[in-house]
Image (cartoon, rainbow, N blue to C red):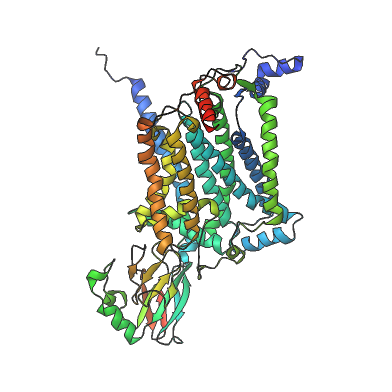
């Protein structure tokens, strides 16, 4: 890694660093050698850090005004919207921030899928990422319950009832989760507590995620191991800091568009009606970022198997490094995988779409086909592809294809001359 | 002296670990059990309902333990329809006679056994209830006939205190 023999210039710095080597850590982070060919898909790690901090800061300020009680929660959210100074702004940033967080995390995950970032030696980084993703879903779900609107209440009812599918102990677990015989005040207060806790767990895991990343270093679009530091790398600061910063600004434009021009477009009008245990809204749908999994849940006609399928769809990602048998990381050099990758992207988008539609007729059929394909991709296509696929030659370094001498470059030139 | 002889140190190590494990479990259990329904929730275990205003073919929905309870005063056709069903046609076989002791009155939790939504009255393919969330159809006895729900709607413990009052719980 970067130089362990680092010594701060000032006397005070040296005195401090000998006792707690924080400046050595700071030096490692700024000098950290990064592949020089990282593209904008690599900027979402920084964007996600920004999203997490935004959620924590806006969440803390909302918690100063919110009241976690079944009789007062709904009103206290309206109080935030109408009475609290800039309460509307803070709440809209927090609510849309959740969507932005998931938008960024999905791009981050699909970047890893395209460039094979989950493969050895980066399996632990990937698995920590999946745990973070699961915690994000838990935090988002519980946060959505807190305004105590109709969607909050019935979303909580449906999701907690998923546990009742477990044989024998299921009903007991659901009662335990509720702290009663239905979703009620005890459920709300514990969800508030956990919603407050989880972001800090995520923060801790993000530190581990980055720590694990800094052991092998970043993957890159070419997907090859590189020497560090070398002519293939640039120091994190200023090169990556500036690139990440620019991407973050672009991202914030999208974020601000939702906050200021369409703050409720990603939500449901039903959640502005206070929770009523006597009436279920006609059409219950989760937030957009959970729709693909909701579609998988509904596509299975059996209750227990539906829940199992939904959980498997997420957990299958954790074993992905061992399902993908190909030694080549980047899809750039995997002509067949590249096509299957885009089919998977389409498949997940289709699942998301049918998840928002009623589970009947053609929608149900499409959901079933898309669910089957989702599992087929991970359980059959990926393992087989590693053995069958004829991959393209991989360059020896990042610099090589640019300066010539790569077999891949020759192939590229051939293509060009054919077109002419 | 044999090498395998148990020493005082081994005994202390095992005993400490065992006591430590029991102690940890004893502390963890209250932390887990505090999330179960508390005394005040359990105290609201029963509720009495006046059903004198209910005419045949109508349903009264009341809240019991935070959950809706359907009290249906059934018409003769509904009773006949429910009692004519063959057991082999049912996903969760239960006789209507067992579900509604007094055939005119059907009392059950208005909670879909799939994922807990409230089914709608007089809807669905079997003239009973229909759950809008994931499409479960229930018959005039509240039994699941079609859709993802695994069981019939639950019949709670209830009794007629007098001709016009039902006590649930």
Left or right? Give the position of A381 relative to A192.
left
Q: Quadrant of residue A67?
A: bottom right
What percent of the width, then of the height, locates residue A180? 47, 60
Determine whether A119 is above or below A130 in the image. Answer: above
What percent of the width, then of the height, locates residue B166? 41, 79
Q: Quadrant of the N terminus of chain A?
A: top right
Q: Nearer the viewer, residue A116 or B162?
A: A116
Is residue A150 something that shows in the picture? yes
Q: Nearer the viewer, residue A318 or A53?
A: A318
Q: Residue furthest front?
A: A420
Residue shown at the point (40%, 85%) measured from the top left:
B57
Left or right? Give the position of A139 relative to A375.
right
Residue shown at the point (61%, 14%) measured from the top left:
A4
Determine whether B47 is above or below A288 in the image. Answer: below
What percent of the width, then of the height, locates residue A125? 50, 31
Residue shown at the point (33%, 71%) measured from the top left:
B143
Determine whether B169 is above or below A328 in the image. Answer: below
Is residue A222 something that shows in the picture? no
Residue shown at the point (37%, 39%) measured from the top left:
A381
Q: Quadrant of residue A251?
A: top right
Q: Quadrant of the C terminus of chain A?
A: top right
The number of discs equals 0
Determine whether B75 is above or below A177 in the image. Answer: below
Q: Nearer the viewer, residue B151 or B8?
A: B151
Q: Nearer the viewer, residue A186 or B142?
A: B142
What percent of the width, then of the height, locates residue B54? 44, 85
């Amino acid at each position: 890694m970067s130089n362990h023999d680092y010594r701060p210039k000032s006397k005070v710095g040296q005195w401090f660093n000998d006792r707690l080597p924080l400046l050595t850590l700071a030096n490692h982070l700024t000098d950290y050698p990064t592949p020089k060919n990282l593209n904008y898909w690599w900027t979402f790690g920084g964007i996600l850090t920004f999203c997490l901090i935004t959620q924590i800061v806006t969440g803390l300020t909302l918690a100063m005004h919110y009241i976690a009680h079944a009789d007062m929660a709904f009103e206290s959210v309206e109080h935030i919207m109408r009475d609290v100074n800039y309460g509307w702004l803070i709440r809209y940033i927090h609510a849309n921030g959740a969507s932005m967080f998931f938008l960024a995390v999905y791009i981050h995950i699909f970047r890893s899928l395209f460039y094979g970032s989950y493969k050895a030696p980066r399996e632990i980084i990937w698995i920590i990422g999946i745990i973070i993703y699961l915690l994000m879903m838990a935090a988002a779900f519980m946060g959505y319950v807190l305004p105590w609107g109709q969607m909050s209440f019935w979303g909580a009812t449906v999701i907690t009832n998923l546990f009742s599918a477990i044989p024998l102990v299921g009903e007991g677990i659901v009662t335990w989760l509720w702290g009663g015989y239905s979703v009620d005040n005890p459920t709300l207060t514990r969800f508030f507590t956990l919603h407050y806790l989880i972001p800090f767990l995520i923060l801790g895991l993000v530190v581990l995620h980055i720590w694990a990343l800094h052991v092998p270093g970043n993957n890159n679009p070419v997907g090859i191991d590189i020497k560090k530091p070398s002519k293939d790398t640039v120091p994190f600061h200023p090169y990556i800091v500036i690139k990440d910063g620019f991407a973050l600004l672009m991202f914030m434009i999208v974020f601000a568009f939702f906050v200021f021009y369409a703050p409720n477009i990603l939500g449901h009008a039903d959640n502005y009606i206070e929770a009523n245990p006597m009436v279920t809204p006609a059409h219950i749908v989760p937030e957009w970022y959970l729709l693909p999994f909701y579609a998988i849940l509904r596509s299975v006609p059996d209750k227990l198997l539906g829940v199992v399928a939904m959980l498997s769809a997420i957990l299958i990602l954790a074993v992905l490094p061992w399902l993908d048998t190909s030694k080549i990381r980047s899809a750039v050099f995997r002509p067949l995988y590249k096509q299957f990758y885009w089919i998977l992207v389409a498949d997940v988008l289709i699942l998301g779409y049918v998840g928002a539609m009623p589970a009947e007729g053609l929608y149900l059929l499409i959901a079933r086909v898309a669910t089957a394909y989702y599992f087929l991709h991970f359980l059959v296509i990926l393992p087989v592809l590693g053995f069958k696929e004829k991959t393209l030659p991989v360059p020896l370094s990042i610099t090589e294809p640019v300066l010539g001498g790569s077999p891949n470059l020759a192939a590229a030139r051939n293509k060009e001359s054919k077109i002419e | 002296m044999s090498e395998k002889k148990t020493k005082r140190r081994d005994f202390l190590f095992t005993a400490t670990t065992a006591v430590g494990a029991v102690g940890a479990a004893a502390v963890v259990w209250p932390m887990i059990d505090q999330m179960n329904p508390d005394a005040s929730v359990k105290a609201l275990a029963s509720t009495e309902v006046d059903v004198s205003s209910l005419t045949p073919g109508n349903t009264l929905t009341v809240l019991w333990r935070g959950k809706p309870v359907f009290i249906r005063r059934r018409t003769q056709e509904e009773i006949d329809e429910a009692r004519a069903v063959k057991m082999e046609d049912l996903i969760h076989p239960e006789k209507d006679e067992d579900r509604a002791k007094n055939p005119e009155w059907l009392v059950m939790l208005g909670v879909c056994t799939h994922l807990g939504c409230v089914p709608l009255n007089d809807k669905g393919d079997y003239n009973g209830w229909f759950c809008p969330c994931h499409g479960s159809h229930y018959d005039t006895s509240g039994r699941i006939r079609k859709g993802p729900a695994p069981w019939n709607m639950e019949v709670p413990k209830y009794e007629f205190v007098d001709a016009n009052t039902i006590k649930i719980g």
